[in-house]
Image: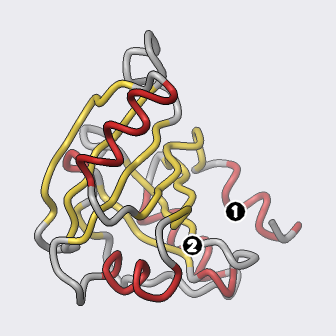
């Protein structure tokens, strides 16, 4: 992370929320991570707006409070995840930071000259509010900013 961004985000980032992995088949991916690594599904949903079917997985016994693995499968080929799979194949798609205020974090990043993808946050997993930092401005990584439901 660029040094000049450190003060802007320090007051907003509270944790690494999750790592997103694009998969072509959600059920097969859930089975793989459950059987291979013992991860437990703590949440599933369909997000029509983003065109994905998704699952959040956590390590056994963490109660869903720790960093999650988010599996994302496309609902349609023209969704962001569908396009990602066509271009890059299955794999790591994003790194998400939990923030206390997604509006303020987005504004702070914009003030530093970074491209934030949405003018206004969108609905994310489990009623969260999300925005994204363009990968070209974040060292080639798509960064998601996640304000959990209930904090807004």
Please give left or right for residue 22 compared with residue 19 in the image. Answer: left
Q: Nearer the viewer, residue 133 or 21?
A: 21
Vertical placement of residue 101 versus 116, above or below: above
Q: Please, what secondary structure does the residue beneath circle 1 have?
A: helix
- x and y, in percent, of residue 21 in the image: 46, 58
Of all residues shown, which one is farthest toward the top?
Answer: 61
Is the image coloured rainbow, by chain, by secondary structure, or in one colour?
secondary structure
Q: Residue at x 24, y 71 (%)?
A: 74
Counting the numbered discs, the total is 2
Pointer 2 residue:
142
Please give left or right for residue 133 compared with residue 84 in the image. Answer: right
Please give left or right for residue 146 compared with residue 137 in the image. Answer: left
Q: Please, what secondary structure does the residue beneath circle 2 have?
A: loop
Q: Residue at x 31, y 80 (%)?
A: 82
Pointer 1 residue:
8
Q: Which quadrant would residue 39 be assigned to in this image?
A: top left
Mark 1, mark 2: which one is toward the viewer?
2
Please give left or right for residue 111 compared with residue 33 in the image. Answer: right
Mark found first going from the N terminus, 1 or 2? 1
From the image, which quarter does the N terminus lie in?
bottom right
Q: Label 1 to label 2, Cα distance in Å?
A: 18 Å
Q: Nearer the viewer, residue 30 or 5?
A: 30
- x and y, in percent, of residue 22 in the image: 42, 64
Vertical placement of residue 96 versus 1, above or below: above
Q: Residue at x 50, y 49 (%)?
A: 99
Question: 10 Å neighbourhood of mark 1: few (<14), some, or many (≥20)?
Answer: some
């Amino acid at each position: 992370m660029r040094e000049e961004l450190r003060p802007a985000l320090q007051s907003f980032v509270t944790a690494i929320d999750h790592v997103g992995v694009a998969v072509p088949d959600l059920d097969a991916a859930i089975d793989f991570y459950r059987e291979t690594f013992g991860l437990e599904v703590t949440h599933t949903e369909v997000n029509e707006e983003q065109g994905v079917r998704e699952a959040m997985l956590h390590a056994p016994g963490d109660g869903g409070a720790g960093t999650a693995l988010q599996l994302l499968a496309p609902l349609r080929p023209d969704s962001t995840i569908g396009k990602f799979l066509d271009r890059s194949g299955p794999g790591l798609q994003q790194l998400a930071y939990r923030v206390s205020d997604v509006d303020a974090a987005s504004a702070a990043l914009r003030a530093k000259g970074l491209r934030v993808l949405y003018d206004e946050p969108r609905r994310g997993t489990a009623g969260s509010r999300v925005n994204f930092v363009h990968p070209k401005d974040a060292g080639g990584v798509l960064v998601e900013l996640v304000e959990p439901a209930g904090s807004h």
